[in-house]
Amino acid sequence: MDSNNNVVKRTVMVVSNGGEAGHLVVSEITSPTLPASSHAMPANDFFVGRKGVTPDGCGVTAQGEEEVCSEAFRDAMRDLAGGVTVVTVGKGDDITGFTATAVNSLSANPPRVIVCISKGSSSFTPLDSNRSFAVNIIGSGDQAIADQFAGKGGLKGAQRYGDAEWTTMYSGTPILSASLAALDCEVDEVIERYDHAIVIGRVRAIRIFSRQTPLVYWQGGYQQLVSSPELIGGLRNCSGPKAVQYP
Ligand SMILES: Cc1cc2nc3c(=O)[nH]c(=O)nc-3n(C[C@H](O)[C@H](O)[C@H](O)COP(=O)(O)O)c2cc1C
């Protein structure tokens, strides 16, 4: 912190279990200049329960119900580092998709994933009607693709696919050839909650080509995960997709 309590530099050590079982890899994410917090609050302040309601009404919903202040909630969630994915939707020329960090494993047995999508997203209706989608895990060298699928520059639908190389697996949904791993899914269930929907995907095919570190989103920006030379060397030796499974 500087004398104004601004964060000027922050280093986080990330410990992950990479490579062989039991072999710990210590990596580092550095962010020389963190963007200023979106919600001005004193350093080391914290909110619990309803203490986030401020005199200006922050923390009160349109219906007048008290909630913790959504700006404080967003600030807290900025600390949660997320792996960056591109969720592809559609087939043939009728394709679209979006960049997503709200993606997670729901269950390994059976293999199910969840994706949280804004109901305002242009991908929501196509995803719901196609009943299929693919999760593409993005590598650190493919930030441009993440930008395209976030709609940067006003790109829409098929324009987001640019000149990257794409393939297909089980459902015909495009799979990014450069993705670290890709999951081709059928929609199992769409649960609408608030302004988002939780989509449960039944994984029908898997492609793994993890030859570089993942792209990470943290504190409102893309970060590079700097891993041990040992792990990077191992990934670079991977000459092609490690596994393609069709159930
Ligand atoms: C790093 C990052 C992560 C995002 N994660 C999600 C997400 O998990 N769910 C979601 O609906 N939108 C997410 N978005 C926003 C979408 O990528 C996209 O910008 C938004 O759906 C608007 O798309 P549209 O122009 O197709 O309507 C994310 C954007 C970025 C840059």
Image (spheres, helix red, strand yellow):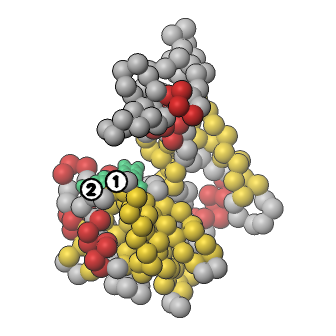
Q: Is residue 75 left or right of residue 144?
A: right
Residue 157 drawn at (x, y percent): 21, 65
Task: Decide: is 12 above or below 180.
Answer: above
- State the residue position of label 2: 120
The residues tagged by marks 2 and 1 sit, at their Cα atoms, a distance apart of 7 Å
Q: Is mark 2 within 8 Å of ligand 1?
A: yes
Q: Earlier in the sequence, mark 2 or mark 1?
A: 2
Please tell me whether mark 2 sits on a helix, a strand or a loop: loop
Q: Nearer the viewer, mark 2 or mark 1?
A: 1
The furthest residue to the top: 3
Does residue 83 sit above or below 133 in this rendering? above
Numbered label attached to residue 58: none
- The image shows residue 30 at horizontal and vertical percentages of 56, 36
2 and 1 marks in contact (CB < 8 Å):
yes
Residue 105: quadrant of the picture: bottom right
For badge 1, the amino acid type reads: Asp
Q: Amino acid at mark 2?
A: Gly
Q: Which mark is residue 195?
A: 1
Q: Measured from the top left, where is residue 187 in percent x and y?
A: 41, 78
* Residue nearer the viewer, 1 or 25: 1
Is disc 2 surrounded by few (<14), some (14 to 19) or many (20+) residues within 10 Å? few
Residue at position x 78%, y 66% in the image: 21
